[in-house]
Image (cartoon, rainbow, N blue to C red):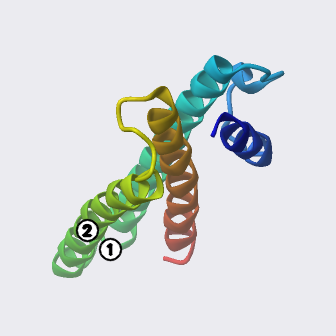
Amino acid sequence: MMKRILAIILLYSSFSHGADVCRNVTASDQVDSCLKSKKDSADKYLNEQYSMLLSKVNSEYINDESLKLDFVKNIKKSQRDWIKFRDSNCKLYSFQIDNKSSAYETTINECVAKMSETRGKELAELAANI
């Protein structure tokens, strides 16, 4: 399992929001730290894109309060639903791993990082198209 996780970390080392802790990964505890860092960075990126999208909607729809409120309501609902999906999907992704092991948490962190990075890019694209 650790070989799989090490392969994953090498595959995703191109994340643009990775941290220095991911350089020269050679041991499983370093993989754990790296993926925790990537998850935290991806979550931060996701939150930034979410905030930027809301700000863009608020500024672009300033003259149509009703439409603005509807759009914001839909964005918030979509994001809450997406977070539920992400968390459920990541549990499924790591289902066969003992949930008390560090490999489980590492696998969850890798999944959350990957999905949050992708979602952040989706939100950025949505904001760019408003």
- 33 relative position to 73: left or right: right
Residue 98, image x and y in percent?
40, 38
Give the number of marks: 2
**Which residue matches tag 1?**
61
Label 2 to label 1, Cα distance in Å?
10 Å
Residue 70, image x and y in percent?
19, 77
Disc 1 marks a residue whose amino acid type is: Tyr
Disc 2 marks a residue whose amino acid type is: Val
- Foreground: 12 or 40? 12
- Foreground: 21 or 108? 108
Residue 75, image x and y in percent?
30, 69
Which image quarter is the N terminus in? top right
Q: Residue at x 50, y 53 (%)?
A: 116
Q: Residue at x 41, y 55 (%)?
A: 50
Q: Is mark 2 on a helix, strand or loop?
A: helix
**Which residue matches tag 2?**
72
Q: Which residue is drawn at 56% across and 44% down?
A: 110
Residue 118, compared with residue 43, is above or below; it is below
- Label whose residue precedes the other's in the sequence (2 or 1): 1
Residue 69, disc: none
Residue 117, compared with residue 27, is above or below; it is below
- Foreground: 20 or 123? 20
Q: Which residue is drawn at 79% across and 21% down?
A: 26
Determine crowd level at label 1: few under 14, some 14-19, many 20+ residues with C-alpha closer than 10 A.
some
Q: Which residue lies furthest to the right in this view?
A: 24
Q: Could you say which quadrant of the image residue 82 lies in?
A: bottom left
Q: What element carries label 1?
A: loop
Q: Which of marks 2 and 1 is in front?
A: 2
